Image (cartoon, rainbow, N blue to C red):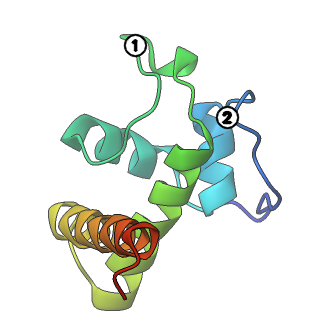
Amino acid sequence: MHDDILTGVLLDDVALTLDELARACNVETEWVVRHVQAGVLGGETSVQVTSWRFRSGDLARARRLLRVERDFDANEDLAALVVDMADEIRRLRARMRVLGID
C-alpha cells in the first residue's frame, strides 16, 4: 500500500492516472486494474493500462467500493451491487424531492 494518500476535490476536467487513482484510494494499482477488468469500475480505459484516465465520479465510486469491501469483507461483485443499489436509492430520493414526494 502507498503511504501518501491524496485528498482534495477532483475537478471534472482533470483526470487521474491509474497510479494517482490507486494512491488516492490507498490501494495497489492491481486493485484498480482488477475492478476495471471486472467491469465494476469505469474510467477512460484503452488497451494500454498506462493510458487509463479516471474522473471524479470514478474516484468516488472506487472509494465507495473499497469501503464496502473492507467494512463487510465483500468481494468486488457484491460491493458493486451494494454501491449500485445505494446510488439508485439516492437518485430515486432526489427525484422524489423534485416531485414533492417525501
- Rounded to the nearest angstrom, the CA distance separating label 2 from label 1 is 14 Å
Q: What residue type is disc 2 on?
A: Leu
Which residue lies at the image location 75% right of the left edge and 30% below the top edge? 14
Residue 59's x, y, as percent? 57, 51
Q: Secondary structure at mark 1?
A: loop
Residue 32's x, y, as percent? 43, 46
Q: Which residue carries the number 1 mark?
A: 46
Q: Secondary structure at mark 2?
A: loop
Which residue lies at the image location 23% right of the left edge and 78% below the top edge? 74
In the rendered structure, find residue 16 and report the number of the disc placed on it: 2
Which residue is the extreme one toward the top?
47
Q: Identify the image quadrant of residue 84.
A: bottom left
Choose between 63 and 26: the one closer to the eye: 63
Q: Is disc 2 surrounded by few (<14), some (14 to 19) or many (20+) residues within 10 Å?
A: some
Q: Which quadrant of the figure contains the C terminus?
A: bottom left
Residue 53's x, y, as percent? 57, 26
Which residue lies at the image location 16% right of the left edge and 61% below the top edge? 77
Left or right? Give the position of 44 relative to 11: left
Q: What residue type is disc 1 on?
A: Ser
Choose between 27 and 85: the one closer to the eye: 85
Q: Which quadrant of the figure contains the N terminus?
A: bottom right
- Mark 2 or mark 1: which comes first in sequence? 2
Can residue 19 be seen in this snapshot? Answer: yes
Can residue 1 be seen in this snapshot? Answer: no
Left or right? Give the position of 8 relative to 91: right
